């Protein structure tokens, strides 16, 4: 049982860490492209900024979904129930 709990902790850490890393990279690329597009065509800056905020919201939602799944695995681990039923305890 300790093995399942330990591996779940590692999976949760990877889920949150890699999700945050991906969001950080994605937000950086989006911000750079916004600045580049605004510098090329300043008259389109308000439209680009609106689309930027929409895209950042969607990118951040990916990390929040990952955190929700990680919290589910942390506090209501379904693998422990499967292990208990397999062992017959």
Image: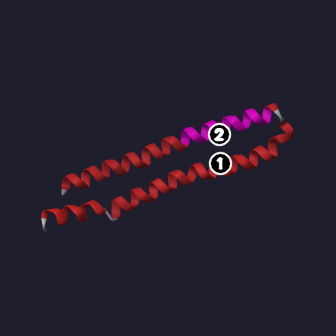
Mark 1 nearby-residue class (10 Å; few <14, some 14–19, many ≥20): some
Q: Position of residue 53 (x, y in %)?
A: 69, 50
Q: Residue at x 38, y 45 (%)?
A: 14
Residue 32 lies in the magenta stretch:
yes
Q: Residue at x 30, y 63 (%)?
A: 78
Q: What kind of element bears circle 1?
A: helix
Sequence-wise, the earlier of marks 1 and 2 is 2
Mark 2 nearby-residue class (10 Å; few <14, some 14–19, many ≥20): some
Q: Quadrant of the N terminus?
A: bottom left
Q: Position of residue 66 (x, y in %)?
A: 46, 53
Q: Which mark is residue 55?
A: 1
Residue 43 is left or right of residue 57, and the answer is: right
**Farthest-out residue, left:** 88
Residue 9 is left or right of residue 85, and the answer is: right
By secondary structure, the bulk of the magenta-drawn segment is best described as helix
- State the image quarter where residue 40 is shown: top right
How far is the residue under mark 1 from the one under mark 2? 8 Å
Task: Return the residue at label 2.
Answer: 30
Residue 51 is left or right of residue 75, and the answer is: right
**Farthest-out residue, front:** 86
User: Would you say the residues marked 1 and 2 are in contact, meaning their CB atoms lie under 8 Å apart?
Assistant: yes
Q: Position of residue 45 (x, y in %)?
A: 81, 42
Which residues make up the magenta segment?
A: 24-39
Q: Position of residue 62 (x, y in %)?
A: 53, 51
Q: Residue at x 20, y 52 (%)?
A: 3
């Amino acid at each position: 049982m300790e093995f399942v709990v330990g591996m779940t902790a590692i999976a949760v850490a990877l889920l949150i860490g890699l999700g945050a890393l991906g969001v950080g990279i994605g937000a950086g690329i989006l911000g750079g492209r916004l600045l580049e597009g605004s510098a090329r065509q300043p008259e389109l800056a308000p439209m680009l900024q609106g689309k930027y905020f929409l895209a950042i919201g969607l990118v951040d939602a990916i990390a929040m979904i990952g955190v929700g799944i990680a919290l589910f695995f942390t506090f209501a681990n379904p693998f422990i129930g499967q292990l208990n039923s397999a062992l017959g305890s």
